[in-house]
Image (cartoon, rainbow, N blue to C red):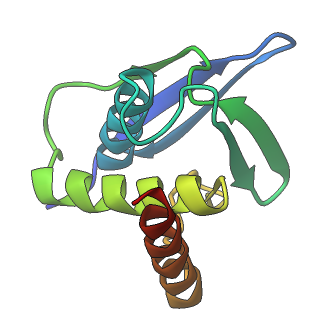
Amino acid sequence: MATKTAKMKFFLPSESFEFETDINFVRAYEELVLSANSASFLSASKAVQLVFPDKRLTLRLDTPFTSERVGEEGLDERTIGSYFELLKVTVFYNSQIILDEAGNFIEPSEDILKAAKEWSEDTSSEDD
């Protein structure tokens, strides 16, 4: 199945910024924002950095944005779910979403995922 792209456009005080990326990543980011804004596991005021090779954007999860896509072609629930879990871990742990030149999400290294998992276990055990 060919991956379809969608456009994400963020509206910042000084500029608007847009990029194209995998439609499944867009859906996962939308879910992350919805989760943060419904006061579940993240805060809407959480700072997030979108890190491109030549640009770094610092936003909050409640930064206004729109996404444009054509139809539902290319959507895959499992891919959206795995992106969502990766985004949740990376944003919660180190706040950076790293993208390549084409705007595609670069999955975090095993080291980062392992550290994030240990960190989340430590923080959840402190809550008990």
At x 73%, y 53%, the residue is: 51
Q: Quadrant of residue 82?
A: bottom left
98 left or right, relative to 80? right
Residue 17 spot, x, y in % from top left: 70, 25
- The one nearer the camera, 5 or 16, is 16
User: Residue reaching furthest top?
Assistant: 13
- The one nearer the camera, 62 or 118, is 118
Total residue callouts: 0
Q: Quadrant of residue 109?
A: bottom right
Residue 103 spot, x, y in % from top left: 57, 51
User: Residue reaching furthest front?
Assistant: 128
Q: For residue 2, say whether it is visible.
A: no
At x 33%, y 59%, the residue is: 85
- Quadrant location of the N terminus in the rendered image: bottom left
At x 45%, y 55%, the residue is: 87
Relative vertical location of residue 8 with respect to residue 62 in this rendering, above or below: below
Q: For residue 124, say whether it is visible.
A: yes
At x 55%, y 73%, the residue is: 119
104 left or right, relative to 13? left
- The one nearer the camera, 68 or 63, is 63
- Quadrant location of the C terminus in the rendered image: bottom left
